[in-house]
Image (cartoon, rainbow, N blue to C red):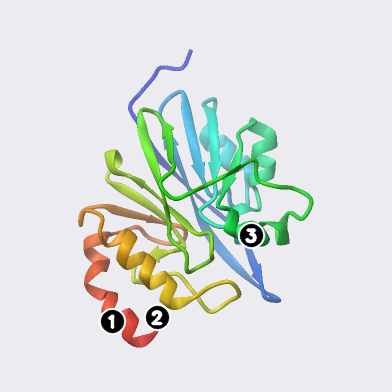
Amino acid sequence: MAERTGPRIDHVVTSGTFSLDGGTWEVDNNVWIVGDGTEAVVIDAAHDADAIAAAVGGRRLLAIVSTHGHDDHIDAAPALSARTGAPVLLHPADLMLWKQRHPDLSPQGELSDGQKIAVAGVELTVLHTPGHSPGAVCLYAPDLGTVFSGDTLFSGGPGATGRSYSDFPTIIASIRERLLTLPPDTVVRTGHGDSTTIAAEAPHLEEWVARGY
């Protein structure tokens, strides 16, 4: 039996493509794994099910949580689910995006605002943060001092809103009301690129609004 340890956050970077509205771009994605020595939850199964499964190791995978339905965040989810038996969870407002990538498959469960996902003695609280996509969510883990922001908030600004199903005023409202109200020292672990903190990003909100970024 694996020795039980305290909760930790593991990080894998995977590479692939993102496609929407007729365009395709090369991207690197952050895959976050929250767990301990015996169980884990994967946040965003991007591109490489083998690499993610290797990082999970022999732990029991409780869930594969998708912060939103863009294909670069869900492309490896069915394969990882088939391999581990873990259900894929997605907010239903992003099902149309999921179906663009996996037309013959469906997630095994839905995410909703305020839902709590327990793993390794901590809870991840689902925050519905639409704007980058209608069903975008963040996962707040106060016991770990972190929020997993998907593509809602990055180091230096909000997620992109120039493509289908996205809306700039909506993402700004989500950031203002759901994320910048978290404790300032909360670490923001993003869907792409470097992590940041709420304190580092909060002073710049009005700048982003002014320039439409």
CB-based contact (under 8 Å), mark 2 and mark 1: yes
| Mark 2 residue crowding within 10 angstroms, few (<14) / some (14–19) / many (20+) | some
121 shown above or below 134: above
Gap between marks 2 and 1, in whole Å?
8 Å
- Which of the marked residues, 3 or 1, is nearer the chain's N terminus? 3
Which residue is found at the position 47% from the left and 27% from the top? 39
Which residue is found at the position 65% from the left and 48% from the top? 76
Report x, y in % for residue 72.
60, 59
Helix or strand or loop: what does disc 2 sit on? loop
Report x, y in % for residue 108.
65, 40
Which residue is found at the position 37% from the left and 72% from the top? 172
Does residue 213 appear left or right of residue 106 in this picture? left
Q: Mark 2 = which residue?
A: 213
Gap between marks 3 and 2, in whole Å?
23 Å
Helix or strand or loop: what does disc 3 sit on? helix
Which residue is found at the position 33% from the left and 59% from the top? 178
Report x, y in % for residue 119.
42, 31
Q: Mark 1 = which residue?
A: 207
CB-based contact (under 8 Å), mark 3 and mark 2: no
Asked which quadrant contains residue 197, the reply is bottom left
User: What label sits on residue 71 in the rendered view?
Assistant: 3
